[in-house]
Image (cartoon, grey):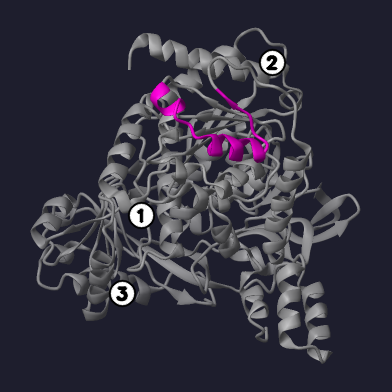
Amino acid sequence: MSKSTNLFIVNHYKQYLQQLILTGEEAATHDLVHIGHIGLMQPENLHDLIDAFTQVTQSGSTLPSPRLHISLLTGHIQAQQMEFTHFVTTLTQTLTPLIKDIAIAPIEGCQRLNLLSNVTIDCYFGSPIEQLNAIANHRQTVQHWFVASSTLLPTVRDHFYSSAAIWQLGRLSYDNAALSIYDIDQHAIEPLANELKAIIKHCGFQLLDQHQTHSNGVDVIACQERQALRNQQQANFAYQGSLTPPLIADTIGIIGGGIASASLALSLAERGRNVVLYCQDNMLAQGASGNRQGAIYPLLTPENNALSRFYQQAFLYSRQRVQRLIRQGFTPSHDFCGVLHTGFDERTTARLAKIIEGQAWPSDIALPVSAWQASHIAGVEINQDGLFYPLGGWICPHEFAKASLELASTLSNITIKFHCKIDNITHSDNGWVLYTESNTSPIGQHKQLVLANGETLTQFSQTAQIPLSGFRGQVSHVPSQGQLAQLKTVICANGYLTPAHEHLHCVGASYVKNPENLTFCPIEQHENGQKMRQSFADVSWPNDIDTRNNDARVGVRMVSRDHFPVMGFATDMETLNQRYQIQLNSNDKPSLWQRYWQTTPAPVHDGLFVLGGFGSRGLSSAPLVAECLAANLCGEVIPVGLDTQTLLNPNRMWMRKLLKGKAI
């Protein structure tokens, strides 16, 4: 692209951004500008948009400098794998100057990129109409849509501009939002069918080119239709409870001190929100987040179901979070050395083979490897085929949590109260009141309170019935010696094994449901030492794993039956059970009650939220889920679709049964 064309595009972006930021009434009351982008002529255009935004916000305006959120509908779908992969590769190379070693994978759905402290891009890959339908109602509506003229070509425009797709654009937009063509391609613009122009106008949009200015007029009838679509979506997902909590300007309280609470504090701080964090220990990450090393890699299934897709997106976001900390000068110990996954018996080997053969996995996500390739990757002899996750690796969880909170403290007011075990919470007219066991007077009060306290998440009466189970995990620390010292990647087989960090490897972990205590267990220590010997019985290096020093750490991981975390409003189980008892005592047809549960907002505790149930994969999932909750609390679009949001909802186990007419 020529420099003169680049300058033209930057000026086009500036023209509309100036209206939004410098003169827009809506923008004057918000700290965020939300721009939609339909297609890209060149990935460099994102640089142009960010450059224009920077120029406008540094132009001497007396208004507070806002953040920029870009929603990019690429239109690329996995069915066109070669074209999809090429686009993602080019996009990655283009954005690398903004975030070192950025990882974007050719998978369908949203991938959120926090490029700068004030710039976020949501890249939506897949069918535009499917991606638009999956975005929840929210207050952060799109203020302007930039249109790549290439998307208006007759061969592809039905992909982007069906009547249904344009109405969904309207549902997500301000009443007076317009669509403007930002590049020069008269071959695309001139044959623009009158029918398409009519649909765009009918849906309440102006379609502008480089010679037109934005009018503030609105189509009242179209706006009513848009609101009807919003109401319809809210009704379809009423059983979740409110999709958008009420906005509150007060400081948000978080109970917990591990990866989940630290990630949430950082996501809130990036939005300028103040946080008080209540930690029961004398330092951070003393629970399940306190291990020396934890593996980070996606969870895949042969059918690539919703769980598999969620963990791919979450894993990439966690990786990006670590990279951001590094760019900001923090030094959490980590190594993205990859993760090698093998079976360890007939059943697990067959399961892994189904995963490998089930999908054409993008090479950035997973690569099938032979025994020879696996040995070369690992640096030790691997005598079986496997699956390699090239972007995976390990992170020191407690250093990750500490660095996240330190970065958050540079962005907003973050108060951490140590030695502060909250034993009871009650609701008052002024919000949630917090009590410790040793203090009859409240220690804190918050309009919005998040329970992110790991193994003690279900200790409160308001959360006691959330179906999570605690599993004890003892991780052994073994000296780096002999052939073991040559290990270059994380190995996951029967348990996991990490490369050396400070002359020690982590191996484990045990998995004991509802443990009676958290004391060191010699039996589990011995079993940890046997795991890799059982996995690779015919090679010698596992014999160098020596657990006899009895160096280990024990933690409890909270696990859900469906392996999804829990995120969102805490369910008001007392009210839910009261309604259910009415159902049991009625003579109504079951279908009437199924309809009732589908269309009636689920009872929740106002202002009380939960964040937990991450199991043994908190490093791979907690940062994204925390980002979703922070965005929701601030009225912003979240980076997962509505179906995934439903799967994360704390009430999902009960509502699945009620919606099917089954007993709870």
Q: Residue furthest right?
A: 429
Residue 565 position within the rendered picture, expressed as x and y whole percent measured from the top left: 54, 62
Quarter placement of the C terminus: bottom right
The residue indicated by pointer 3 is 527
Q: Secondary structure at mark 2?
A: helix
Q: Nearer the viewer, mark 3 or mark 2?
A: 2
Q: Quadrant of residue 508?
A: bottom left
Q: Quadrant of residue 584?
A: bottom right
- Above or below for 409 versus 359: above
Q: CA distance from mark 1 to mark 3?
A: 24 Å
Q: Which residues are magenta?
A: 186-208
Q: CA distance from mark 2 to mark 1?
A: 44 Å
The residue indicated by pointer 1 is 297
Q: Is residue 583 left or right of residue 229?
A: right
Q: Earlier in the sequence, mark 1 or mark 3?
A: 1
Residue 481 position within the rendered picture, expressed as x and y whole percent measured from the top left: 18, 54
Q: Is residue 189 magenta?
A: yes
Quarter placement of the N terminus: top left
- Tell me the crowding category of disc 1: few under 14, some 14 to 19, or many 20 or more residues within 10 angstroms, Cα based: many
Q: Earlier in the sequence, mark 3 or mark 2?
A: 2
Q: Is residue 147 magenta?
A: no
Q: Is residue 407 left or right of residue 360?
A: right
What's the amino acid at mark 3? Glu
Q: Is residue 151 left or right of residue 598?
A: left
Q: Which mark is residue 280?
A: none
- Above or below for 450 versus 124: below
Q: CA distance from mark 3 to mark 2?
A: 65 Å
Q: Earlier in the sequence, mark 2 or mark 1?
A: 2
The residue indicated by pointer 2 is 22
Q: Is residue 382 visible?
A: yes
What's the amino acid at mark 1? Tyr
